[in-house]
Amino acid sequence: MLLEDNYYKVYPMHVDGDTSVSYRIALLPECDIYRGHFPGRPVCPGACSIEIIKECVMAWTKKCLSVSFIKQCRFVAILTPGQGKELDLKLDIVPTGDGYAVNARLADEEQTYVEFKGNMTCV
């Protein structure tokens, strides 16, 4: 199941160069995932943040991908759906022999929430 339009909404991307792209994202607090992840005080599951990154890389590359290796993934701050803030997802996507090396940063204007470095391969 893709999380786009259920867990989050993505706005048009902005290309920053040959390998860099940025997305503006809004979390959708009415998603059922939040009801099961600390009801009454929901937080965004880390796995869903990684899935957002993967889905945006797939949108950019137009390929079905799988996270094959995580070199580093830091959840720097707690992300909650009720903050009402839009988030910026900055991606650096470099082709490799069998997929892509990905560096990602999910943040708003005040705080970084997720930093990801890893590889995604074509499925």
Image (cartoon, helix red, strand yellow):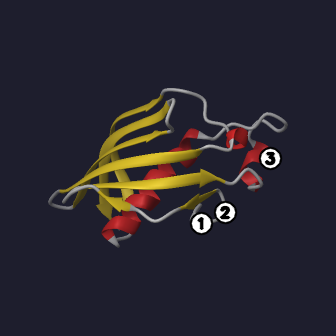
Residue at 69% over, 39% down: 83
Q: In this view, does 71 lie to the left or right of 12?
A: left
Where's residue 34, x and y in %? 74, 46
Q: Mark 1 or 2, which is nearer the eye?
A: 2
The residue that mark 1 highlights is 1
The residue that mark 3 highlights is 35
For this rendering, which residue is in front, 29 or 88?
88
Density class for disc 3 (Cα within 10 Å; few <14, some 14-19, many ≥20) is some
- Secondary structure of the residue carrying tag 1 is loop
Labels 1 and 2 touching (C-beta < 8 A): yes
The C terminus: image quadrant: bottom left
Q: Mark 1 or 3, which is nearer the eye?
A: 3
Q: In which quarter of the image is residue 22?
A: bottom left
- When the figure is inspected, residue 31 is found, relative to residue 42, above or below; the finding is below
The CA distance from mark 2 to mark 3 is 13 Å
Of the image marks 1 and 3, the number of the one nearer the N terminus: 1
Where's residue 119, x and y in %? 29, 49
Residue type highlighted by circle 3: Arg
The N terminus: image quadrant: bottom right
Residue type highlighted by circle 2: Asn
The residue that mark 2 highlights is 6
Where's residue 84, x and y in %? 68, 44
For this rendering, which residue is in front, 82 or 120?
82
- When the figure is inspected, residue 75 is found, relative to residue 30, above or below; the finding is above
Residue at 51% over, 62% down: 11
